[in-house]
Image (spheres, grey):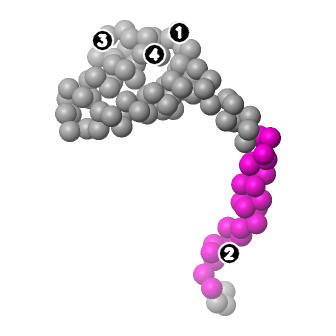
Amino acid sequence: TLKVALNYDSNAYSQWWGLSIPTKYLCWFELVLISIVTPNASFLGHLCGILVGVMYGVGLFRPLFAITDRLGIDTVFHAIQSGYNYDQYSDPPGPQ
């Protein structure tokens, strides 16, 4: 998903075993290659990951992100994170 989202609009080319492949299509090439080399790998799982990355690149999640921004979901996560003492387990208990 991340590879697709980051390279969705890329005009760059990647070299793969001597082949020059547009970077934005590299994930599709890898999906076919992995399916041939490792037939027991989850084709559907990898395909779904690529499709979610494409959906993100197209912008289908922007309305969802706008809703969560209006609801202030990020402030909830920040409050949870800042309310937890991460250092409480940094030192062993007892006298030092």
Q: Residue at x 28, y 22 (%)?
A: 32
- Is tag 3's residue or tag 2's residue first in the polypeptide sequence? 3
Q: Position of residue 89 (x, y in %)?
A: 62, 75
**Residue that carries the numbered disc 3 in the rendered image:** 18
Which amino acid type corresponds to the residue marked 1 in the rendered image? Asn
Distance from disc 4 to disc 2, alpha carbons, whole Å, reads 45 Å
Distance from disc 3 to disc 2, alpha carbons, whole Å, reads 53 Å
Which amino acid type corresponds to the residue marked 2 in the rendered image? Gln
**Residue that carries the numbered disc 4 in the rendered image:** 23
Task: State yes or no: discs 3 and 2 in contact (Cβ < 8 Å).
Answer: no
| Prevailing SS of the magenta stretch | helix
**Residue that carries the numbered disc 1 in the rendered image:** 11
Label 4 Cα neighbours within 10 Å, binned few <14 / some 14-19 / many ≥20: many
Image-quadrant location for residue 40: top left
Q: Nearer the viewer, mark 1 or mark 2?
A: 1
Which amino acid type corresponds to the residue marked 4 in the rendered image? Thr
Task: State yes or no: discs 4 and 2 in contact (Cβ < 8 Å).
Answer: no
- Is tag 1's residue or tag 2's residue first in the polypeptide sequence? 1
- Could you say which is closer to the camera, residue 46 or residue 11? 46
